[in-house]
Amino acid sequence: MYDYSKDAKVFKAFCDVNRLQILELLRTGEKCACVILENLNISQSTLSYHMKILCESGIVVGRNEGKWTHYSIDNKGCEKAKNLLDILTKIQK
């Protein structure tokens, strides 16, 4: 039987207002966590929670620089998410 848990993480990434706002910010390029925090009305711990979900989905990647993490959208992860949606919603005859 197929394990859908990894696929579910992709869709979980898209089902929260804060995560959608984070993705919108990242559309213009890599952002430091501090910049994301400046643009959202959330705490550091809440940001960490949302970034963990986005990174686990494969849609976002992070890289550490000093005490901050810089995040960006991962093109390969986005392609996988698009393909997954296409597969799961394609009507078979």
Image (cartoon, grey):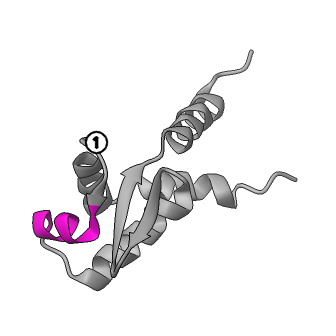
Decide: is 66 above or below 1.
below
Q: Residue at x 29, y 52 (%)?
A: 20
Decide: is 11 above or below 28.
below
> Residue 65 is drawn in which quadrant?
bottom left
Task: Find residue 71 and report its horizontal and vertical position in percent.
Answer: 37, 59
Q: Residue at x 47, y 66 (%)?
A: 53
In this picture, residue 2 sits left or right of residue 81: right
Q: Residue furthest right?
A: 1
Disc 1: CA contacts within 10 A as few (<14), some (14-19) or many (>=20): few
Q: Residue at x 49, y 38 (%)?
A: 75
Task: Find residue 36 and report its horizontal and vertical position in percent.
Answer: 21, 64
The residue where tag 1 is placed is 27
Residue 41 can be seen in this image: yes
Q: Which residues are magenta?
A: 32-40
Task: Find residue 13 and report its horizontal and vertical position in percent.
Answer: 44, 57
Q: Secondary structure at mark 1?
A: loop
Q: Residue at x 50, y 51 (%)?
A: 11
Q: Residue furthest front?
A: 66
Helix, strand or loop: magenta stretch: helix
Q: Identify residue type, mark 1.
A: Arg
In this picture, residue 93 sits left or right of residue 50: right
Decide: is 82 above or below 53.
above
In this picture, residue 57 sits left or right of residue 21: right
> Residue 60 is drawn in which quadrant?
bottom left
